[in-house]
Image (spheres, helix red, strand yellow):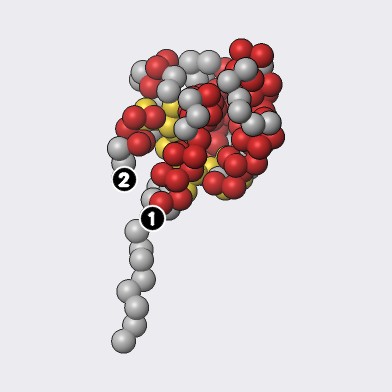
Amino acid sequence: MYAKKDTMQKNKYLLDCNVYISYIINGKLADLVEYILNNDIFVLSCNELENEIADVLQRPHISKYLTEKANNYSDIIHTITHRVKITKKYTGSPDAKDDYLFALCLSHKAILVTGDKKLQRFKESPIQIISTTAFKNLF
């Protein structure tokens, strides 16, 4: 007897920097990690996102909330994500600094998870965008 091959395509998700930062400053990064691992969620990352996270963690108004070194948080995030390269270009997001998020999602057919209301309301978005709350309620 042959084992049935799983042909379902797993969704890919890209968590915006603000999602990680929110979990970190609220002391809940372990909860996010557990949710991702327990539900076998495929989360993407790229150099641009990792650099943005590292930059934000160094800002004084954020770093005062950290209970560990910034590098430790980056290392944890790195262990739950799959680093990929951006292969498509995109311009036209509500904030030009976020164009790379759209380009990555387009490159890898991923869903963007963000707490940014401006991105959530972006009517001309070429990608699917969901809130952090919607992401937490997927599984």
Q: Nearer the viewer, mark 2 or mark 1?
A: 2
- Counting from the top left corner in percent of width and height, residue 72 is at 66, 37
| Residue 101 appears left or right of 139 | right
User: Which residue in the structure is indicated by mark 2?
Assistant: 139
Rendered image: mark on residue 58: none
Pick the front one: 96 or 18: 18
Residue type, numbered disc 2: Phe
- Label 2 CA crowd tier, 10 Å (few <14, some 14–19, many 20+): few
Q: Position of residue 41 (x, y in %)?
A: 43, 48
Q: CA distance from mark 2 to mark 1?
A: 16 Å
Residue at 44 percent across and 19 percent down: it is 116
Q: Which residue is mark 1?
A: 9
Q: Is residue 32 above or below residue 9?
A: above
When the figure is inspected, residue 99 is found, relative to residue 43, above or below; the finding is above
Tag 1: amino acid: Gln
**Number of numbered tags placed on the structure image:** 2
Q: Secondary structure at mark 1?
A: loop
The quadrant in which residue 90 appears is top right
Q: Residue furthest front?
A: 67
Q: Nearer the viewer, residue 5 or 31?
A: 31
Give the SS element for disc 2: loop
**Residue drawn 53% across and 15% down?**
95
Marked residue nearer the N-terminal end (2 or 1): 1
Query: Measured from the top left, where is residue 66 in percent x and y?
Result: 61, 25
Residue 102 visible, this angle: no
Asked whether the beta carbons under mark 2 and mark 1 sit within 8 Å of each other, the answer is no
Closer to the camera, 126 or 2?
A: 2
